[in-house]
Amino acid sequence: MIDLHTVPTANGYKASIMLEEVSLPYRVTAYDLLKGENLKPELLALSRVGRLPLIVDHDVEGGSLTVYGSAAILQYLAEKTGRFLPKDRRERAKVIEWMGIISSDISPAYSGQFVFNVVAQDKQPWAVSFYDRLCRRMVKIMDDQLATTPFLTGAEYTIADMLAYPVAAVSMKRFPGNLDEHPHIARWAAEISARPAVQRGMTVPA
């Protein structure tokens, strides 16, 4: 059994989609970030970072194992189940590379855009403009890639796609608001959204 500690955000959905895709049994504990529940002592005992999602895998030799962070969770579960991560060295490297792009470039761009456009009470025009431009550039990079391959790294659906899909389904829906100028992302997102496991994962926590 796996315990999933999560929140209903783009980041949280990445972990639940993967758990649904690999059909591993799991239990869900949800947290309210606005109430600071992610800083509860019992969660900090699992991960000092105090952020979500994280999983606790109880089906591991030697005792339970905690894994924090959506990218780490997806790679861990892919290796545990032997699914959605190519064995070929070149193909595997591209999946890991795109996971890095999503985690280190695209997601932080959207985090900054959200903070300065939505959260900040005192709007700073330079920051709003900076992150808007950065997000537009990141979306174009992703659209250009999907113009060349059916999925992010090639012909096969992988954990890179699972990591990226909630950004398109949640964050890009907020900004730029639609995918009219990014037809390749739109095509890709529509195909992924039709997967039953993705549909189930996007409702966790209910």
Image: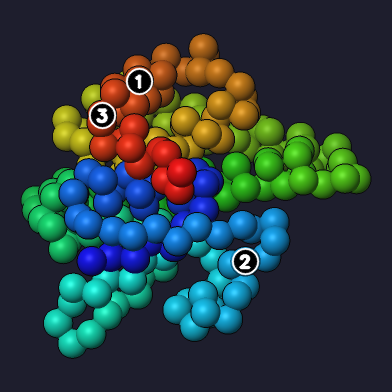
- Which percent across, then down, holds residue 41? 58, 81
* Nearer-the-camera pick, 112 or 20: 20
Vertical placement of residue 161 versus 144, above or below: below
Residue 144 as seen in the image, left or right of residue 125: left
Count of picture labels: 3
Looking at the image, which residue is at 42% across and 39% down? 203
Dot 1 falls on a residue whose secondary structure is helix
List x then y, in percent, for residue 47.
48, 77
Q: Residue at x 55, y 59 (%)?
A: 31
Mark 2, secondary structure of its residue? helix
* Quadrant position of the N terminus in the picture: bottom left
Three-letter code, disc 1: Ala
> Which residue bears the numbered disc 2?
37
Residue at image coords 27%, 51%: 19
Q: Nearer the viewer, residue 85 or 3?
A: 3
| Percent of width and height locating residue 65 | 29, 77
Left/right placement of residue 35 relative to residue 107 reads right
Which amino acid type corresponds to the residue marked 3 in the rendered image? Arg
Which badge, 3 or 1, comes first in the chain's sequence?
1
